[in-house]
Image (cartoon, helix red, strand yellow):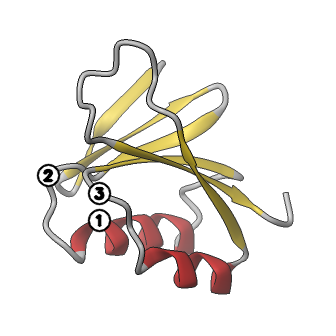
Amino acid sequence: MKRAQPHDSYPIWRTPEAVHIDVRGLQPPEPMVAILRMLDFGEAGSVVIAHLDREPIFLYPELDDRGWSYEIMPPGVGAGNVNEVILRLVRRDA
């Protein structure tokens, strides 16, 4: 896993399967704004894994408008934060 420097106030890093963005700890609407900024400015690639504190219900219509599908991933084995929401985003034209 290649970890990048924090982007503004949240980390972004790449793994072979996706670009990750960790917006946990940010207050609404900052997580949504950060994710949309990443998608809109081409930093994302075709798959993004977003790490959030809560389900981003207001993000879903924005993702639909931008051509991204989404699914909530099950928590990983040994996940540190049981309240973490892991959202997998896939560009529909990819």
Q: What's the residue type where badge 1 is placed?
A: Pro
Q: Nearer the viewer, residue 59 or 55?
A: 55
Q: Earlier in the sequence, mark 1 or mark 3?
A: 1
Number of marks in the image? 3
In this figure, which residue is indicated by the disc labeled 3? 54
Task: Please tell me whether residue 2 is drawn above or below residue 52 in the rendered image.
Answer: above
* Residue 68 image offset from top left, x and y in percent: 68, 68
Cα separation, mark 2 vs mark 3, equals 10 Å
| Disc with the residue nearer the chain's start (2 vs 1) | 2
Residue at the image position 52 percent from the left and 35 percent from the top: 74
Can you tell which of label 1 and label 3 is closer to the viewer?
Answer: 3
Q: Position of residue 56 (x, y in %)?
A: 38, 67
Cα gap from disc 1 to disc 3, whole angstroms: 10 Å
Image: 5 above or below 42: above
Residue at position x 41%, y 80% in the image = 58
User: Are discs 1 and 3 less than 8 Å apart at CB?
Assistant: no
Q: Tell me the quadrant of the picture where the C terminus can be found.
A: bottom right
**Residue at the top extreme of this rendering:** 78
**SS class, disc 3:** loop
Residue drawn where x is 66% and y is 80% of the image: 64
The disc placed on residue 31 is 1
Residue 45 at x, y percent in the picture: 66, 52
Question: CA gap, disc 2 to disc 1?
Answer: 9 Å
- The residue that disc 2 covers is 25
